[in-house]
Amino acid sequence: MNRVRVGLLGCGNVGAALVRLIDEHADLITARAGVAIEITRVAVRDLSKPRDVKLPADRFTDDAASLVRDTDIDVVVETMGGVDPARALITDALRAGKPVVTANKELVARHGPELFTTAAESGVDLLFEASVAGGIQLMRPLRESLAGDRIHRVMGIVNGTTNFILTRMSEDQMSFADALAEAQQLGYAEPDPTADVEGEDAASKAAIIATIAFGARIAVDAVYREGIAGITEDDINSAAILGYAVKLLAVAEELDGGISVRVHPAMIPVHHPLASVRDAFNAVFIEGEAVGELMLYGRGAGGGPTATALSGDLIDAVKNLVSGAKGATIGDLVDRSMLEISETESQFYLLMEVADQPGVLAAIANVFGQHGVSIKSMEQRGMGDDARLVFVTHRARESALSATLDSLRNVDSVHRVGSVLRVLGDEN
């Protein structure tokens, strides 16, 4: 073969960036792949829409199925997003013996295991580096470089929109609403930001990370999810006073023989590497038995960074296709026990509005003690009608903390239990 012909499904922001990258870096890519790579057909929804790519009009089609069936297409790259029709198209391509490269996090999170099986049965590559954390190379280290180590935990910031919002709230004292509006104005957040701010996007990525890190079937619906819409300016200020930063974290870890996968906001110490990750950047912190601690950092989204991850996978797929080989596989995925959030442990931050009178602290401390939750620190802020108590606990089980909160709401001198945030990093 003196060239490999690529069919591209979708030519939006990411797909167009890939086309431009292959054109601009053609000599470099050819040298590294050992053969020329050419985008020969592109499937799009609307043929009349203008696109900033140097491709002749006759290479575009609105019939994605015909592109996949085309015997002149050697490799398929999917950037269209969503589950359907991407799932059927990728399955058909794999069954036809065509390697597939995808950036589709939702599809891999929901149907990864069945697609991995189809790829293995067909003897071709299914590569998905771009599905998690954009330009950060994470899947390849987990699949290959760390394949011989036991991973204990992967924890990271995998959604740039929420990290941008929390950075603005922290550094510029903006409200959540104002920070979200700026993120939308700059194009970091969609007009409907639900998938980002409610943690849905991060949950899909967490499911993929856990699947690869632990070799287990992880259903995205089993991922505990909590977003940042409830984070207030008081929470951000309290965190700073206590020496913490607030981040939306995806956490996948082995605990008590099972696996916990969750997405939620948390306070982390300012000296932790993840605390310094600002704006729309992503970072993933890996803890392995032999390797110790690693952190991968970079742009987690955007056309250029994501296209870079796609091009790396595409070069690998092409090299393997030409040589008749196959890249690193997922291996046999096993069923593992998934822990409920109530079975996990962490420290907790609590803010309560209370009556400013003698005996209040003793009554509250008694409730903590009844449920086996130990108080690490406490301070009072404000007086009179504005009296508030801020607590940070030692490590405690989520179920014990929930029982504590239920009891505290029945204490007469507690007017309101306000914010409750997990605290990670100090005692983990």
Image: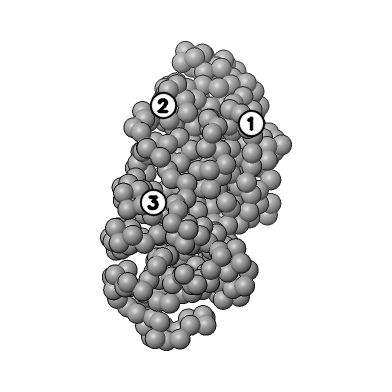
Q: Which residue is mark 2?
A: 258
Disc 1 marks which amino acid? Answer: Gly
Q: Is residue 164 above or below residue 35?
A: above
Disc 2 marks which amino acid? Answer: Gly
* Secondary structure of the residue carrying numbered label 1: strand
Count of numbered badges drawn on the protein: 3
Q: Residue at x 38, y 54 (%)?
A: 124
Mark pair 2, 1: CA separation: 21 Å
* Secondary structure of the residue carrying numbered label 2: strand
Disc 3 marks which amino acid? Answer: Val
Mark pair 1, 3: CA separation: 28 Å
Q: Which residue is mark 3?
A: 108
* Secondary structure of the residue carrying numbered label 3: helix
Q: Residue at x 55, y 59 (%)?
A: 312
Q: Tell which circle, 2 or 3, labels the residue nearer the N-terminal end.
A: 3
Q: Which residue is mark 1?
A: 292
Mark pair 2, 3: CA separation: 22 Å
> Could you tell me if residue 337 is visible in this image?
yes
Q: Quadrant of the C terminus?
A: top right
Question: Where on the picture, by quarter, is residue 384?
Answer: top right
Q: Is the residue marked by circle 1 packed among few (<14), some (14-19), or many (20+) residues within 10 Å?
A: few
- Marking on residue 404: none
Q: Residue at x 58, y 31 (%)?
A: 288
